[in-house]
Image (cartoon, rainbow, N blue to C red):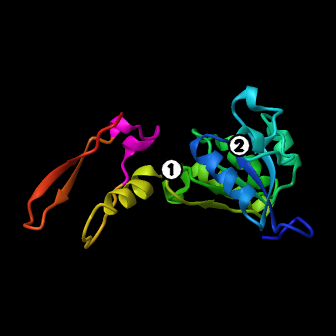
Amino acid sequence: MSIRSGAGPHYRVVQWASGNIGSRALRAVVEHPDLMPAGLYVHTPDKAGRDAGELYGLGPTGVIATHDIDEIVALGADRVLYMPRACDMDEVCRLPASGANIATTRGEFHRAAGLDTAVRERVEAACESGKSSIHSTGSSPGFITEALPLALSSIQRRLDGLRTCPGSGAVLGVRGADVRRVTRRTQGGHTDPLVLRSQ
């Protein structure tokens, strides 16, 4: 993998989709000294044409959001952070074929062997032709596996272990009302319900 940009930030990065996860990733790119925001793909047409930073309270970045994949491909970015709500294999194949490496939170890529054979072969061919890669990482939406365990463990006097088991019910994001009851173990080995109430 080569770096296409010259002096300055090491990687030119496109943020693909700007929902809950994507907007946080965009903020991380804007704030990171080794990354330069190069583009923003948005699914909502009314966001197109607006400055990416101003859409999310980051101040002007000079990066104008677009709803056109051709504009994104033409940028020649080093990386694309692919974080849409639904995975589109035509998009997925077009991006690495253009030479951009993809980092994604999409679950389809957590285990490549689980992909349909024809789809996997298409993706592999796109990566080979663009000399690029796809890296599947993180949890989406991340609340249950990352934030909630830290919050719950902070109220413990002693914590001997912590195990999280992500499930399929978290796909659309977690709302306060979805988190109802968590069990805690008392000193005597009994379990007591710890009720989390939402406003």
Q: Could you tell me which residue is drawn at 56 percent across and 60 percent down?
A: 137
Q: Nearer the viewer, residue 79 or 57?
A: 57
Q: Could you tell me which residue is drawn at 80 percent across and 36 percent down?
A: 66
Q: Earlier in the sequence, mark 2 or mark 1?
A: 2
Q: CA distance from mark 2 to mark 1?
A: 22 Å
Q: Amino acid at mark 2?
A: Gly
SS label for mark 2: loop
Q: Quadrant of residue 136?
A: bottom right
The residue identified by callout 1 is 140
Q: Amino acid at mark 1?
A: Ser
Count up the numbered dots.
2
Instruction: Say whether residue 1 is magenta.
Output: no
Label 2–label 1 contact, CB within 8 A: no
On-image quarter of the C terminus: top left
Q: Could you tell me which residue is drawn at 68 percent across and 47 percent down?
A: 92
Q: Position of residue 54 (x, y in %)?
A: 76, 40
Q: Quadrant of residue 69?
A: top right
**In front of the other: label 2 or label 1?**
2
Q: Position of residue 123 (x, y in %)?
A: 66, 53
Instruction: Say whether residue 175 is magenta.
Output: yes
Q: Nearer the viewer, residue 133 or 178?
A: 178
Above or below — where is 161 with respect to 69?
below
Which numbered marker is on residue 23?
none
SS label for mark 1: loop
On-image quarter of the N terminus: bottom right
The boundaries of the magenta stretch are 166-178
Which numbered marker is on residue 57?
2
Q: Position of residue 121 (x, y in %)?
A: 64, 54
Q: Residues within 10 Å of mark 1 (few under 14, many from 20)?
A: many
Q: Residue furthest top?
A: 46
Q: Position of residue 180 (x, y in %)?
A: 27, 41
